[in-house]
Amino acid sequence: MTALDRRPPVATRGTRPAPPALRPARRSAHRDVVAATAGGVGIVAVVASGLVITSGAGGVAATDLDLVERVSRMHSPLVDATALLIDRLLGPQLGAAIVMLVAVAVWVATRRVAEALTVAGVAVLPWTAAETVKVIVGRDRPDPRLLVDPLLVEPHSFSFPSGHTALATGLALAIVFVVRGRRARWFAAVVATLGVVVVAGSRVWIGVHYPTDTLASTVLGCSVVALARPPWRWLLGRFDRPGRFDRPARPDRPDRPDRPARPAVTPPGAPSVPDLERNPR
């Protein structure tokens, strides 16, 4: 709370100051509106950019192709193996399994189904949005015949944006969501960001995506999560009441098993309860 929030409310004639309890709710609603607006603008910007690039305007497509051709001349056994491994891990089948494992791990750690479902949704939404935008934009992948030595030749499918990078962005946002409010949140955010960068670079390295495909995936993933966050919070506010999605506690276990109740100690010389009942003062 800032110093401005601690000032007493000033009431004018005919008006009544807003209760202090409503201020955090109003600030939260304002942040939700800003997040949803930014998310919507980001999604529209990604789709518009893809259509402009596909039309050939601005020379972006030629620059993209030149960069992919330059990268196709560079090969390293370690980098090649890492890029191909990332291609398999974040594919549709193994990628879905990774998301399920992360959601189950969150449920085991927090004992809350709602939080596990939130993490799963944050991880999957960017990939779903990327697959939808691919159909709208319809940009072809880099032609392997124009590359020196492509590591992977994808069947005919669309390129803009990158589904692997979108899934990596969703997983990174899910990790940041899990560690929010903890001391290691900044470290986790840096590691998650580096992971997205590595995945994006691997897609260009093996010759199946343009650089702008991976950049658009990151922007699209963040925008979709920002747009979906307010309605999801509203939905949880209506249905995620205390104890609704929580695992029931076992009655045979105390709340704090690591701290057993200490027996009461009577000071030396003080009368006990039976003595007081027999000899009342």
Image (cartoon, grey):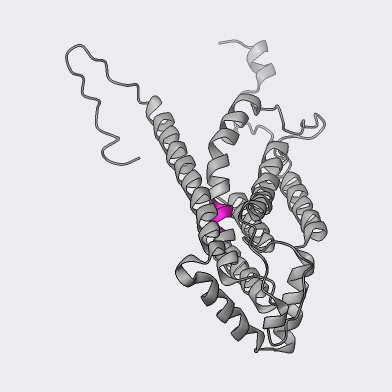
Left or right: where 108 falls relative to 226: right
**Residue 138 percent across, percent down from the top left:** 65, 58
Q: Is residue 170 above or below residue 84?
A: above
Q: Residue at x 73, y 38 (%)?
A: 113
Q: Residue at x 74, y 62 (%)?
A: 157
Q: How many marks?
A: 0
Q: Nearer the viewer, residue 281 or 92?
A: 92
Q: Residue at x 70, y 89 (%)?
A: 76
Q: Nearer the viewer, residue 161 or 184?
A: 161
User: Can see residue 247?
Assistant: yes
**Which secondary structure is most common in the magenta stretch?**
helix
**Residue 85 percent across, percent down from the top left:** 77, 73
Left or right: where 175 falls relative to 226: right
User: Can see residue 182?
Assistant: no
**Residue 281 percent across, percent down from the top left:** 55, 11
Check if residue 260 falls in the magenta segment.
no
Q: Quadrant of residue 145?
A: bottom right
**Residue 62 percent across, percent down from the top left:** 53, 75
Magenta-highlighted residues: 218-222
Question: In the picture, which quadrant includes the N terminus?
Answer: top left
Check if residue 219 falls in the magenta segment.
yes
Q: Quadrant of residue 251?
A: top right
Q: Is residue 57 above or below residue 24?
A: below
Direction left: furthest residue: 13
